[in-house]
Image (cartoon, rainbow, N blue to C red):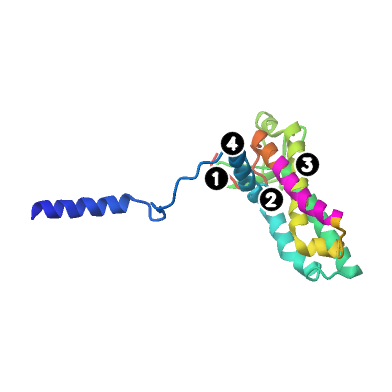
Amino acid sequence: MDTKLENASSQEISEQETPLLVDKNLPDVERNLIQQAISQTFESTAHLANLLPTGSVLAFQLLSPIFSNQGECDAVSRFLTAGLVTLCGLSCILLNFTDSIKDQKGNIIYGFATFRGMWIIDGSTTLPPEIAAKYKLKFIDFVHALMSILVFAAIALFDQNVVNCFYPTPSVGTKEALTALPVGIGVICSMLFVAFPTTRHGIGFPVTSN
C-alpha cells in the first residue's frame, strides 16, 4: 500500500514538473544558420516599436485612423495626417536626447542631455558638474535619433491608413517599395540597436532601478 502511494505521489510530482505546453508527439525541428538568422530578424523587427518612445507610437496608432479618415483622405485629412506623422517623428528624435535620474527620495527627474551635461526640465534641482558631465551628449545619441526616425518611418509605412492616404492607387513598383522598404529598415535598425545600445532612459522609455 505504501509502495502504491509513493508511486502515485512520484507520478504527480513528475506531471507537475512537466511543462503543460510540451507536446511529446511533435518532432524536433532542426534549422540551419540562415533559418535561425531569419527567425531572429523577424522577432527583432516585431519588437522595434519597443525601441521608440511609448507616447509617440501610441499617439500615432490612435490618431492615424482618425486623421486619415480610415485611409480615404481629402486635402484636409491628408494635411492632418502629414502633420501627425511629422510631429510624432520629431518627438521620436527629440525624446532620444532626454534622460532621467533619481533624487535622494527616489523621485524620477527628467532632463535634456546637452554638450555640458543634463539640463533638468522642471528646474527642481541642479546637478553638480561632476555628475552632470556623465550625461553629456555623445555621438551615439545622434545615431539613435537617426535610427528612431527610420524605425518610425517603417511603422508609418506599415500603417495601411497612412499608405492609402498618400498612395491611394500605387503602381506595381510603388507597392513593391512600400512592402520591402519597411522590412529592410527594420532589419538594419534592429541590428544597429543591438550593436550600439544606449544607456539613456528618457521620456517614454522604461526606467531601470539604477
Q: Residue at x 78, y 41 (%)?
A: 146
**Residue 33: mark in rendering:** 4
Task: Name the image quarter holding the N terminus.
Answer: bottom left
Q: Is residue 120 visible?
A: no
Residue 53 tag number:
2
Disc on the earlier residue, 1 or 4: 4
Residue 180 is situated, as x and y percent measured from the top left of the image, at: 77, 49
Range of magenta residues: 173-188
The amino acid pointed to by label 4 is Leu
Between 122 and 23, the one lying in front of the other is 23
Q: Amino acid at mark 3?
A: Leu
Mark number displayed over residue 106: 1
Query: Does residue 177 appear in the picture of this structure?
Result: yes
C-alpha span from label 3 to label 4: 30 Å
Instruction: Mark 1 vs mark 2: give the one in front.
Output: 2
Is label 2 or label 4 in front? 4
Q: Secondary structure at mark 1?
A: loop
Secondary structure state at the residue bearing disc 3: helix
